[in-house]
Every structure is written in C-alpha cells, then in structure tokens.
Image: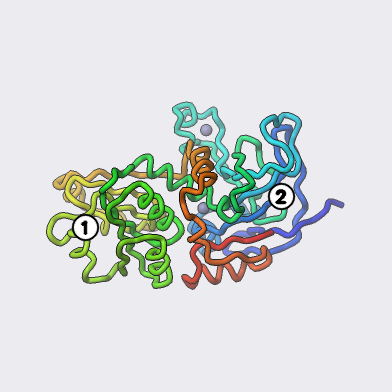
C-alpha cells in the first residue's frame, strides 16, 4: 500500500475535501519530487469551486497552482537541481511543438496543462513536477514571499506589454492580490500617481498601505473629478484587474492613453461601442499569464525590491482550506497562504 499525505482534492461541481491522498513518486526521469513549503489561494481557485464553475478543472486533481517548495528527489535526467534546493513553480506546462509555442508565444500553447488545476498541484505535502517548470530561488527569500512568484510573474508579463514611464499616472480597477502587485510594481517604476478603485473597504485600506495615492469605491462620485477624467483628461494607463471593467476603464483613461486588460471573467458583458476607442485613440492591450517572467521575478524577490509580503493577510495550516475559502468569499482576506 502506498503512503498517504494530506491534500486538497477537487471533486467537481463545487465539491472538494482535505483528505489523505497517495504520496506521489517520480514517474519520468525529468520529474522532481517537491516538498511544498507554502501554497497560495488565488481567485482562479474560487472560480473553480463555484457552481456552476467559473473556471474548468479536472475532478480528482489536487488544487494549488501558486507554490514554493524544496526539492526532495530528482529524476535521472535532472542536472540543474539538487535535493535541498528551494524552487518556485511555473504551473503552466507547455508542449514546445505547437504553432504558438514555435512562434515563441508559449502562453498560447494549444496543449497547455496546469499543475493544481488539470494535474496535481501544491495544496499537499508533496508534489511531482517536471524540472522545466521549476525555477531555483535563494532559500534566503522567505517562503511566504516566494509563494507570490506565480502571480507576480503574470503581473510582470503584463507590465512588459503595457510599460509605464516615470511620471505617468495609473488607475487600477480591483484591489485584490493582482491589483496590489500592479500597485507595488508601478510605485517602484516611478509612477507619479496610482489610484485604486475597489468596492471592499478592507482591500481599499490595504491598497492605501501598499502606497496608493488615493482609493475609491467604484460608485464614488468624486472618482472622475479626482483623476481629471471629468474634464476630458484622465490617467495615462488604466488596468482592469477584475475582467468586467472595460467600460469603466474607457471612462477613466486620457485621450491617447492605454487600457490593460488583465482580469478574466468569461461572463463579462461585451462592450458595444468602439467609437470612444477610435475617436480618442485609446490603445487596448490584453495580457494572459506569462512567458519569460519567472527568472526576472526570482531576481526581484532575491533583491528584496518589492514588499510583496504586505499582501499576505493570513497563513493557515492546510487543513483550514475551508476557512480560507470562507474568508476570501467574505472579502476578509487578500492573499492567504497555506502551510502543508
Ligand atoms: Zn492564480
Ligand atoms: Zn505548445
């Protein structure tokens, strides 16, 4: 009989449990056995657990796609890692052979699969991942900071697609972990003003602590006046970190400015009139996960450049996954990490 370990297993249609799952073993010479140090819960996990689900996942899979781990054992082909190394994980596994991969657009891979969504992930004591998914990081980086590598890699990819110059102004729509990572990055890049628009009072307060110049409720009467949009101006860049705010973004951006679409919501309503975009020459940029950001994220975290730990509101044992989901559902947590 195989040994067991505690794990958060998805069972389809809003069902999950913390249960004893078989301990994984190396199956391919390219595999690495990982001992998970911390795993974060993300908005995608909440979407997976909704009924009907807002995001697909494979029933029977162990959840958790944002995690940091220590190498326990390596397959015979693995040359660049050794037991004891600390690694962060790029959970999106790409094929390298499809036309998107061959164009260098690996985030558009036609055969992509994801650890923690379609294959077993990091909400468990142990996990097996291919060596190509792993990026070594100094063990001097606290595991709770390193646990933010995956969401930060997606934010950095988006930043590279819609960079800012020192002195520019930005409005971020959505003050969850992603919105706040954008805020930290824009602050670091010399933004003159960063505004955060967020309905939750706890998250607005968090945004203020992370360096927002002003925070607003989406319905606030003073929002447009405060950022100059009511007088036909507005901010240089608007980030939709929610996935439902394209129309709002058009109302806040200056003529000739940029809108970055980052959040994803399959149910968001289409924006019907392109007139404003054409007439005011707005540039719209979409960004999806990442391609080459992980090595840069590792350097940012190792250099201690971004105070990403400010986002962490709770660290709980793995068994309290249900409590974590509840806290996030009530808008009480921002980034919650679990310790297996
Ligand atoms: Zn995620
Ligand atoms: Zn591919």
Residue occupied by mark 2: 35
Tell me, for residue 69, which label it has, or none. Answer: none
At horizontal 75% and vertical 44% (from top left) the residue drawn is: 72
- Residue 56 in view of the camera: yes
At horizontal 49% and vertical 64% (from top left) the residue drawn is: 334
**How was this image coloured?**
rainbow
Q: How crowded is mark 1: few (under 14 residues within 10 Å), some or many (20 or more)?
A: some
Where is residue 295 drawn, in percent x and y? 52, 38
Q: In the displayed structure, does residue 190 sit left or right of residue 157?
A: left
Query: Viewer-proximal residue, 155 or 121?
Result: 155
Within the image, what quadrant is residue 201 found in? bottom left
Looking at the image, how many numbered discs can be counted on the residues? 2
Q: In this view, does 153 lie above or below 176?
A: above
**Spatial separation of the CA atoms under disc 1 and disc 2:** 47 Å
Q: In the displayed structure, does residue 256 sit left or right of residue 123?
A: left
At horizontal 76% and vertical 60% (from top left) the residue drawn is: 20
Query: Viewer-proximal residue, 102 or 213?
Result: 213
Quadrant occupied by the C terminus: bottom right
Task: Please tell me whether mark 1 or mark 2 is closer to you in this view.
Answer: 2
- Residue 134 in view of the camera: no
Tell me, for residue 251, which label it has, or none. Answer: 1
Within the image, what quadrant is residue 18 found in? bottom right
At horizontal 51% and vertical 44% (from top left) the residue drawn is: 303
């Amino acid at each position: 009989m195989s040994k067991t370990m505690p794990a958060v297993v998805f069972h389809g249609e809003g069902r999950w449990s913390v249960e004893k799952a078989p301990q994984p073993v190396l199956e391919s010479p390219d595999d690495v056995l990982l001992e998970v140090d911390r795993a974060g819960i993300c908005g995608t996990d909440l979407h997976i657990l909704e009924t009907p689900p807002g995001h697909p996942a494979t029933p029977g899979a162990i959840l958790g796609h944002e995690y940091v781990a220590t190498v326990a054992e390596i397959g015979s082909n693995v040359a660049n890692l050794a037991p004891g190394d600390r690694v962060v994980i790029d959970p999106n596994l790409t094929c390298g052979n499809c036309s998107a991969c061959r164009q260098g657009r690996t985030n558009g891979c036609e055969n992509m699969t994801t650890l923690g969504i379609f294959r077993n992930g990091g909400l468990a004591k142990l996990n097996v991942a291919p060596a190509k998914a792993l990026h070594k990081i100094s063990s001097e980086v606290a595991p709770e900071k390193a646990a933010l590598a995956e969401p930060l890699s997606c934010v950095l990819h988006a930043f590279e697609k819609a960079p800012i110059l020192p002195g520019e102004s930005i409005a971020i729509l959505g003050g969850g972990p992603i919105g706040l990572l954008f805020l930290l990055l824009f602050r670091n890049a010399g933004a003159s003003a960063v505004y955060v628009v967020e309905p939750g009072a706890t998250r607005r307060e968090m945004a203020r602590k992370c360096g927002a110049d002003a925070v607003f409720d989406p319905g606030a009467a003073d929002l447009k006046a405060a950022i100059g949009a009511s007088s036909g101006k507005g901010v240089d860049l608007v980030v939709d970190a929610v996935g439902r705010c394209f129309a709002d973004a058009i109302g806040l951006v200056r003529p000739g400015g940029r809108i970055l679409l980052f959040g994803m919501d399959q149910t968001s309503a289409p924006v019907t009139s392109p007139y404003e975009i054409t007439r005011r020459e707005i540039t719209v940029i979409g960004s999806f996960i990442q391609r080459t950001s992980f090595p840069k994220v590792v350097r940012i975290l190792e250099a201690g450049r971004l105070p990403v730990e400010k986002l962490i509101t709770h660290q709980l044992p793995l068994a309290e996954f249900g409590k974590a989901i509840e806290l996030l559902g009530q808008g009480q947590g921002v980034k919650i990490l679990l310790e297996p």
